[in-house]
Image (cartoon, rainbow, N blue to C red):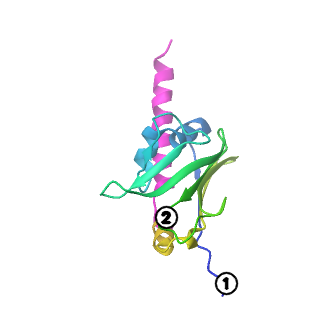
Amino acid sequence: MKRQKLIVERALVMASPCACIWTVLTEPQYLRQWMEVVPEFDDDSPLRVGTRLTWRNTAGQAYLVGRITALEPRCRWVMELHAPDWPREALAGEVTYGFRLSETRGGVRIDFRMGDLAIDPDGEAWRDTYARSQELERIAELAQALAARKRAQDEVSP
């Protein structure tokens, strides 16, 4: 029997400058504000290849670990996810969480992809949560606010 893939794909076009969107996507101070479930970060540096994110339960035990495996500035980043309670080790590129930015006539398109969660016993619930999540909308709000702050600073600067 072929298993159903549990993948989430969403997209949104944002009017903010790509640089502001990228900042919101890669700096922990912003990630903590838009991520559906907030992880712990290795440090407060912007994401880079190798950065590890850890999600812990209320007892402090790690239930999910992510590692940034691809990062192209102002273009895309991808994190591979692994969990200790999955029935097997995830294959490289199997369970990912990531974003891609592309310039469009209407602004910057941000594509989100999470997949394939079928390895996770709770995969359907996670898929449904992220399909309904407001992460992209929160990213857009934060990027707009950051762009407005930068414009205000530029107007004040001599």
Instruction: Say which quadrant the N terminus sits in.
Output: bottom right
Residue 125 appears anywhere in the view: yes
Going from the N terminus, do you reach mark 1 or mark 2 first? 1
**Number of on-image labels:** 2
The foreground one among 120 and 35 is 120
Q: Percent x, y for residue 43?
A: 46, 36
Residue on which the image places disc 1: 2
Whether residue 12 is visible to the viewer of this picture, yes or no, is: no
Task: State the residue position of label 2.
Answer: 130
Mark 2: give few (<14), some (14-19) or many (20+) Cα within 10 Å: some
Return the residue nearer the eye: 87 or 32: 87
Looking at the picture, how far across and down is residue 120, in whole percent? Answer: 52, 70
Which of the numbered marks, if any, corresponds to residue 152?
none
**Which residue type carries mark 1?**
Lys
Label 1 to label 2, Cα distance in Å?
A: 23 Å
Res 16 → quadrant: top right
Q: Magenta stretch: give its range.
A: 130-158
Q: Secondary structure at mark 2?
A: helix
Measuring 53% from the left and 52% from the top, which residue is drawn there? 66
Q: Main structural element of the magenta stretch: helix, strand or loop? A: helix
Q: Residue at x 48, y 71 (%)?
A: 128
* Type of the residue with mark 2: Tyr
Is 133 a magenta residue?
A: yes
Q: Residue at x 45, y 43 (%)?
A: 41
Residue 44: x and y in percent read: 45, 35
Q: Residues within 10 Å of mark 1 (few under 14, many from 20)?
A: few
